[in-house]
Image (cartoon, rainbow, N blue to C red):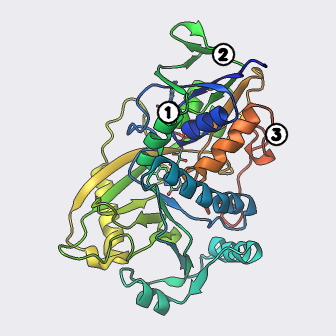
Amino acid sequence: MPLKTEAIVVGAGVAGVMTALSLLRKGASVTLIDRWEPGHPRASSSDYNRIFRSIHGKDEFYTRWVREARLRWMELQEEVGCELYHECGALVLAGEGHSDWEDATIGTFEKLGVPHFKISPDEVRVRFPQFSVEKVAYGLYEPEAGMVMSHRAVVETAKLFQREGGRIRRGHVTCDEAERLHLDGKPLEADTIVVSTGPWLGEMYRRTIRPISKIVRQNIIYTSTPDADTTYDVGNMPCWIDHGFGAYGIPSIEGHGVKAAIAWTEAIIDLDNDERIVDDATFTRTRQYLRHRLPGLVGQRAVDQKACQIAMTPDTHFILDFHPEHENVLLSGGCSGHLFKHGPVYGEFAAGVALREWGTADRFKISSRGTLSAGDSPSGR
Ligand SMILES: Cc1cc2nc3c(=O)[nH]c(=O)nc-3n(C[C@H](O)[C@H](O)[C@H](O)COP(=O)(O)OP(=O)(O)OC[C@H]3O[C@@H](n4cnc5c(N)ncnc54)[C@H](O)[C@@H]3O)c2cc1C
């Protein structure tokens, strides 16, 4: 009998746990290493939930991946026996005069047969009365979209991985000047090593990854729903994206309140040293936005907050490529704010690349990174 491939996955965020589980299911012997417990709040995969949507402008690759991921999340939630995916729909509010990304998405949806509705501002008002439609050109509603319960998904997938024979250990993996990996003062060795340390990937690989990875702080505020009112609960309200304001949000689920984030592309974060608490400016900006877009929440108080980060690549494509000098080390990450939803598909693809069952996609290679226009970008950023 052939010996099992020894695999190590460093980093137990969504990319790491999904890759580790897939490697295990492909027959490898797998150890997953993280500095903290899977689900910890510093990771980009933290927080209660993430938006799940096929909406990716003209990018067919990610659109197809999300369509596949939708089925995978449903399968996974059956396996783990708790809710991971809520299909509450996603609504994009296309701004007057700024709808290139939304227009391109409609073209992609029509080509690939993704269910969607283009609705007028008046229809938005009737179907989703929570939203004010000032300066909205149209709404693009994707019914087979919604949210993934991110923290729960990471924790439950890690437990599933362990139940199936995977090992999880706590440890801080470091890189030396030659970008060789070490743990506890010894070289880290295995047949294949996948480094999926999310925003920390650029700190570890200062030469190889840092030039294509910019860390951007993301601040989230949860606002109370009005007393005795279910209007803002999941089931009555979709997730939404409001590019004109660089904003997005998620309806209240399991009592968390309405989640809203305003993207602040220049905000910085010290990954290991900052307190994970949002600043006053974020409260002010989020309140101003809610007053404008969700006026029924005026006067409601913040009930929770999260301070987190994303690793942006110049073209917003993920990174999944072997280290140029260490051929058994696969670097995985560059989330660019949209990796979570792809989790199960991303993990299986990464596992196949790590085991050399197939090559990576050109878009995920470390070299040849350029910037994309908002119209070409999969995330519209
Ligand atoms: C506020 C916010 C909103 C987002 N919204 C969405 C959304 O709506 N939809 C969507 O699809 N995506 C969204 N994203 C993006 C998505 O959450 C990320 O793409 C995804 O979680 C990245 O996962 P990751 O596994 O690459 O990184 P992480 O989750 O950060 O995991 C990296 C892990 O590596 C560990 N680690 C780091 N260094 C070391 C080391 N040296 N040794 C050992 N372990 C180490 C860390 O402890 C961590 O657990 C959002 C992100 C943020 C921050």
| 245 up-or-down from 33: above or below | below
Mark 1 or mark 3: which comes first in sequence? 1
Which residue is labeled 1 in the image?
163
Cα–Cα gap, marks 2 and 3? 24 Å
Q: Tell me the number on the disc at residue 95.
A: none
Cα distance in 3D space between marks 1 and 3: 27 Å
Q: Are marks 2 and 3 in contact (CB under 8 Å)?
A: no
Q: Secondary structure at mark 1?
A: helix
Q: Amino acid at mark 2?
A: Arg
Label 3 Cα neighbours within 10 Å, binned few <14 / some 14-19 / many ≥20: few
User: Circle 3 is placed at which residue position?
Assistant: 358
Q: CA distance from mark 1 to mark 2?
A: 31 Å
Name the mark nearer the viewer: 1 or 2: 1
Residue 12 location (% of width, % of height): 51, 34
Picture coordinates of residue 94, whole percent (x, y): 55, 77
Q: Residue at x 65, y 46 (%)?
A: 346
Point out the image quarter for the C terminus: bottom right
Residue 24 in the figure: left or right of residue 231 = right
Report whether residue 268 is seen: no
Q: Quadrant of residue 231?
A: bottom left
Q: Secondary structure at mark 3?
A: loop
